[in-house]
Amino acid sequence: MAADAAAQLYQAFVDQDPAEAIQVVERMRASGVAQDALFDVLYAPAMGLLGGSWASGAIDEITFTQAAVVAEQVGSFVMPPAATRDTGVTIVLGTIHRDQHSIGRTIVAATLKEAGYRVNDLGIDVRPADFVERVGETGARIVIVFAETMRAARSVASIRDMFVAEGVTGVVLLVSGGPFAADGGLAREVGANGVVTGAEPAIRIVSRVARDLAGGGAED
Amino acid sequence: MAGRSKTIIAAEALARQGQVGAAVHACYDALALGDQGAHVHALLASMMLEGDFYDEAIAEATSAIEADPDCSPAYLALGMAYDRRGGMWDQSVLVWHELAEVVPDLVTAHVQLGEAFAAAAYSEEAVESWRRALELDPREARATYNLAIASLKREGMALALPLFRQAGELDPSQDELFFALLGLTDAPIITVDPARVKPTREARLGAAGLALKADDLFSAAELVRAVLDEQPDDSEALALAAYAYLKQEAANEAMACALRAVSLKPDLAIALYCLGVVYARRTGLKRHAARVFIALAKKAPAHALVHVLLAESLLALQRYEQAGKAYRTAVRLDPACVRARFGLAATYLTEGRHAEASWEIRRAAYYDTKRQRLFWRLYDEYTAGGEES
C-alpha cells in the first residue's frame, strides 16, 4: 500500500498537481501512518521515483524542475515535527544573586526549551526570594541555580532555607557551575539534590527528576 | 625604510622553505652585522612564534614595530603571540586594532580583533568586529563561525546551529570533501570540453567530476546525461547530478537524484554526502541527516570533514557529547580543520568548559592564518611597499 501511495505521490508531482499530492498525503495519514513516519514511508520513495524517471529520460528537465516545485509545496505536510512535544514540566532557573555569569545558564535554558520543557529563566543576579516566589507562581517543582564563584555558590543554601521556611516541599533543587563541578560535596552542603554539569546532562537529569516527580518518588 | 641586506634576503628564503633553525641563524647574523631594520625583527618574531616561544616573539615583533610603526607583518606576529600566550587580551586588542588601521582592508585583522574582544569579555565589540570583517568579505568563514559561537553564548544552540552551517558552506573544505570522496583531491582545475571526452562511462564520469571541480555545471550535466542515457541506473552519475543540483541550490532535485542513487547503491559515499547535506538543511530532517552522516562516517572514516558533518547533525539533535567525540575525531585527523575546532569549542561551551573552548578558537585562528600564509602575504606587501618608496 505504501508503495502504491508513493507512486501516486510521484504521479501528482509529475502532473504538477499539488492538491492531489496533498490528498495522497492525507489518505496516508488517515490510514494510520504517523506524522514522523510520512517522510520515510511516502515522500522519500516518491522522490526516489522522481530521480529515477529523470535519470531514465521518462521526464524531461523542465518537468523534473516543476515536479520539484510541487514536492517543495508538499514538503511541509510530510516533514517530521521540528519541535519537540511539550513535556508539560516547568523549570525555574537563574544565576544566583551577586553573580553575573550567563553563558552556561543561557545554553542550558535554550537546550531544555528545545527539549520541550517550560523554562522560566530569571536571568542573572537573582535573589533567593525571587526563585521561591517564581516557584510559587508557576508551580514548578524543578529549580536550577547557576553560580560560577565560590561565594555565590555557597549562597545557594539560602534558597533551600527559604523553601523550608515558606513550607514549600517537593521542589528539586539542582545546581550548576564551576564550584559545584570542582567540589563534589558542595552541592549537598547547600541543600541541592543534584549537579547539572552541562546542557546534555541537564536534559538527562531533568528528565529523570521529572519522571521521579510524576511517580511521586522525589525527595527534598 | 632602508633596503634589505643580502643576509636578511637569505634568511627569508630559508624561512619560506621551512628551514627555521638556519633562518634564525641568518637573522642573528644580520643583527650582528648591524641590521636593526624591521624586516629582521619581524622575521624573527614569526619564527619564534612558529616554535611557540611567545615571549621572544613578542620582544622581536615589538622591536620591529619600534623600527617601523608601519611594519604590518610584525603586528600580525605580535597579535598572534599575545593571543597564543593567553592572558594578554588588552594588549592583543590594541595590536589587532593597530593592524586594522595599518592595513584597513585586511579582513583577518578584524576577525582577530573580534576574537581578542571576545576573550576580554567585550561581547558587543567582538560582534561588531566580525560584522566589519563580513562587510569587507561576506564569505569570511571564520567571522561567521565566531558569530555562531557568540550566538550560542547568547541564545543557545538552536539559533547558533544555522550560523555554523552557513559558515561551513562558506568554508571551501566542504566542496573539497566531495572531491576527495570522488578521488579528485589532487586533480587540477581544468576546462572540460564534453565533445572531446572519450565516449565511455569512466571517461565521462571522470570528466564530469573535473567539470564540477571547475564549477562548470553545464559540461558536467551534459556528461552525466550521456552516461544516464546509456545506463539510467548508474548510481555514481546520479550522485554527480545530485551535487550539481546542490550547487545550484536546487535541493529537491538534488534529493531526488541522491535518493535514487542511494536506493541503487546504499553505501556510495558521494551520494550519502549529497543526501546528508540536503537533509541537514531542513530542520525536520535532523535525525535523517544524522543517520546518513553516520553511514558516511563508516564508509569514509579517514576524512575529517565527514566527522564534522556528523557532529553538526548531532548538535541539532542535542547530542552534544557525541558531537564532541566526532569533532575530536575530526581534529585528530586534521588538526588544521577550523570548522572542527569551532564546533569542538561549541561543545565545550555546552559543558561549561570555557577555557578549553577558548583554546580551540585560538588554535583555529593559528591554523587559519597559517593556511592563508598571511604572514608572508603581509611581509611581501610590506617589502614591496618599502622598495617602491
Image (spheres, coloured by chain):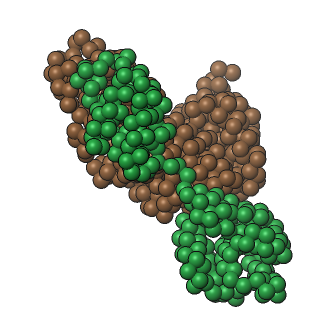
Chain colours: A green, B brown
Q: Is residue B308 above or below residue A209?
A: above
Camera-side residue of A26 and B212: A26
x%, y% of residue B163? 58, 43
- Which quadrant, please, contains the C terminus of chain B? top right
Q: How many marks?
A: 0
x%, y% of residue A45? 31, 39
x%, y% of residue B120? 73, 55
Camera-side residue of B46 and A184: A184
Q: Is residue A107 above or below residue A179?
A: above
x%, y% of residue B210? 31, 25
Tell me which residue sits at (30%, 43%) in the image: A2
Q: Is residue A109 visible?
A: yes
Tell me which residue sits at (25%, 45%) in the image: B267
Q: Is residue A89 above or below residue A66?
A: below
Q: Is residue B58 visible?
A: no
Camera-side residue of A175 and B150: A175
Tell me which residue sits at (65%, 34%) in the image: B134
Left or right: where B179 falls relative to B28: left
Left or right: where B156 falls relative to A123: left
Camera-side residue of B70 and A7: A7
Q: Is residue B23 above or below residue A194?
A: above
- Which quadrant, please, contains the N terminus of chain B? top right
Left or right: where A30 falls relative to B84: left
Tell me which residue sits at (45%, 61%) in the image: B322
